[in-house]
Image (cartoon, rainbow, N blue to C red):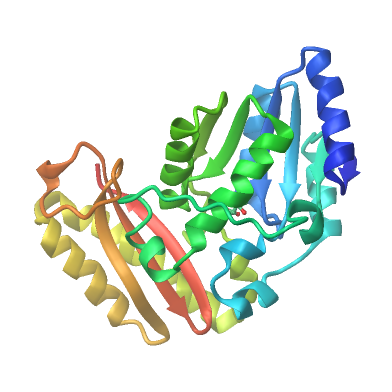
């Protein structure tokens, strides 16, 4: 596996691969890799001749500077995992390399990006689109892989790809969970042991709500989750929205959309965790 730090070197490598007719899969990450990332990587390795994994903590998508500072950085361990998974290139550029000048482009995919994470983290999705569009341009992948844990992000990246008519396939991959249900996240490493136990209640309440939803209305199910989280000391709900899986807009009844997903954001101490659950 090559660890590449500059765009120029990356592009030389990619050009040679493309010239040999090799298909390229891209897995964009911010590092601090866990089994969730590795599931995306494995899928890409299976489906493409070569896989490129980017490791870049993108400053433009952090609206909270403290979150950016505290974001875990574990490049050496990450590279070891990627090597074992059969990755051809780990691309780990500096901020200056990705943004030699400030990125003044703005991306707006309303109403997909105005709700939930878009409402609570102003500018977040603009930053995500800035970096993902740059990575797509640098790597020119045939397929790019994103996790469904960031359910709204995946919808927005699909929409960006569609509107920009980019010639690649976006592949969404299921949430990976710890054996006790907690959704895997790089931010989990910031939880103390006690907080880790408390955080477990998020997926517990979501799974219980899936069973509850079978014979209760959508609004009752929403309250069930809100009350379930409120009952846990140490958790603070930011939002829980039950949305149309395609449009990200809230729905009021189970028959209002073909696919329905509940999206949650909860603070566990200082750590902001997200998760989601599919109802239909
Ligand atoms: O999901 C993430 O880790 C990031 O938002 C992404 C897609 C790598 C862009 O920085």
Image position, residue 255 (x, y; %) = 11, 42
Look at the image and tell me in which quarter the C terminus lies. Answer: top left
Position of 205 relative to 196 (above/below): above
Give the farthest residue toward the top: 21
Depth order, front residue of 48/11: 11
Total numbered labels placed on residues in the image:
0
Depth order, front residue of 91/262: 91
**Residue 38 visible, this angle:** no
Image position, residue 49 (x, y; %) = 75, 21
In this rendering, would 239 be left or right of 24?
A: left
Image position, residue 116 (x, y; %) = 35, 62
**Residue 67 visible, this angle:** yes
Residue at 50% over, 33% down: 164
Which corner quadrant of the image does residue 226 belong to? bottom left
Give the farthest residue toward the bottom: 233
Residue at 45% over, 68% down: 121
Position of 23 relative to 214 (above/below): above
């Amino acid at each position: 596996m090559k660890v590449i730090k500059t765009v120029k070197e990356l592009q030389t490598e990619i050009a040679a691969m493309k010239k040999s007719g090799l298909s390229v899969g891209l897995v964009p990450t911010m590092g601090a890799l866990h089994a969730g990332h590795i599931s995306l990587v494995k899928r890409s390795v299976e489906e493409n001749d070569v896989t490129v994994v980017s490791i870049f903590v993108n400053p433009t998508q952090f609206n909270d500077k403290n979150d950016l500072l505290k974001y875990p950085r574990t490049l050496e361990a990450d590279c070891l995992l990627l090597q074992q998974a059969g990755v051809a290139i780990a691309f780990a550029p500096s901020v200056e390399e990705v943004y030699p000048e400030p990125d003044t482009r703005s991306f707006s995919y309303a109403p997909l990006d105005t709700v939930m994470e878009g409402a609570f983290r102003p500018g977040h999705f603009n930053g995500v689109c800035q970096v993902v569009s740059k990575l797509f341009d640098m790597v020119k992948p045939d397929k790019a892989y994103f996790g469904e844990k960031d359910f709204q992000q995946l919808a927005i990246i699909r929409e960006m790809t569609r509107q920009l008519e980019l010639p690649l396939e976006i592949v969404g991959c299921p949430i990976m969970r710890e054996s006790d249900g907690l959704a895997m996240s790089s931010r989990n490493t910031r939880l103390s042991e006690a907080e880790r136990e408390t955080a477990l209640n998020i997926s517990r309440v979501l799974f219980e709500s899936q069973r509850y939803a079978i014979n209760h209305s959508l609004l009752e199910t929403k309250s069930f989750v809100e009350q379930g989280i409120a009952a846990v000391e140490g958790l603070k709900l930011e939002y829980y929205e039950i949305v149309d899986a395609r449009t990200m807009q809230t729905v009021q009844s189970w028959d209002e959309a073909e696919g329905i997903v509940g999206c949650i954001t909860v603070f566990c101490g200082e750590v902001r965790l997200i998760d989601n659950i599919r109802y239909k």
